[in-house]
Amino acid sequence: MIAETVCSAVSAAGLGIAVVTAYRKRYVAAVRIAAYSLVPIGLVMTGVVEWLADTAFSPTAWAGFGVLGVAWVLFMTTRAVERRRGGTRKERRAAARAAEQPGAVAPAATAPSLGQGSRPATRPAPASRGDDDFSDIEAILKKHGI
């Protein structure tokens, strides 16, 4: 009963503000204010306000909201764990089967890692002289007068 009275008063005040706004020749703003002010009285007439008031003071409804909250937390926790593990159970099984196959390669493998078995390994060429390694350093030292 109190909620309906408050909503009616809010609607009446909003319509009063809309009339004052229209008097100031701001018609678009006045129509918008009138639209907003009719929402509370419309909620009272449809019964939404009564339903909300009954729900707000019902322990069973609050217990239901608590159960919904726990369900949401459990759902989000399982989603986070699933993302950490790398996908759904079906995807993990498919990856395990692919890893068991001979010649299986990781999806992110690069081209050189695919063909190492067929190509001979290359060895680095030996240095021709031991002085070549220090020639750049000697040039820098001479440049600075050391």
Image (cartoon, helix red, strand yellow):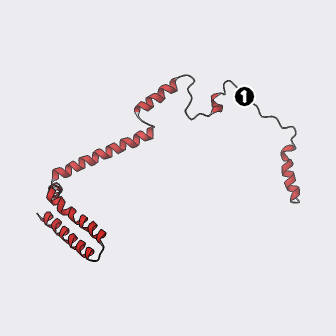
Nearest the camera: 9 or 142? 9
Q: Quadrant of residue 79?
A: top left
Whether residue 81 sits left or right of residue 103 in the image: it is: left
Nearest the camera: 19 or 14? 19
Q: Report the label total.
A: 1
Q: Which residue is denoted by mark 1 in the rendering?
A: 121
Camera sees residue 122: yes
Q: x%, y% of residue 72?
A: 30, 46
Residue depicted at x 25% and y 47% = 68
Q: Quadrant of residue 25?
A: bottom left
For the residue labelled by badge 1, is the local secondary structure a helix, a strand or a loop?
A: loop
Q: x%, y% of residue 6?
A: 16, 67
Q: x%, y% of residue 142?
A: 89, 56
Q: Is residue 91 above or below residue 143?
A: above
Location of the C terminus by quadrant is bottom right
Nearest the camera: 100 or 53? 53
Residue depicted at x 76% and y 31% = 123
Q: x%, y% of residue 62?
A: 20, 52
Q: Is residue 41 above or below residue 68?
A: below
Nearest the camera: 18 or 119? 18
Mark 1 neighbour density, 10 Å: few (under 14) some (14–19) many (20 or more): few
Q: Residue furthest bottom?
A: 24
Q: Is residue 76 above or below residue 145?
A: above
Residue depicted at x 80% and y 34% = 125
Which amino acid type is marked by label 1?
Ala
Camera sees residue 57: no
Location of the N terminus by quadrant is bottom left
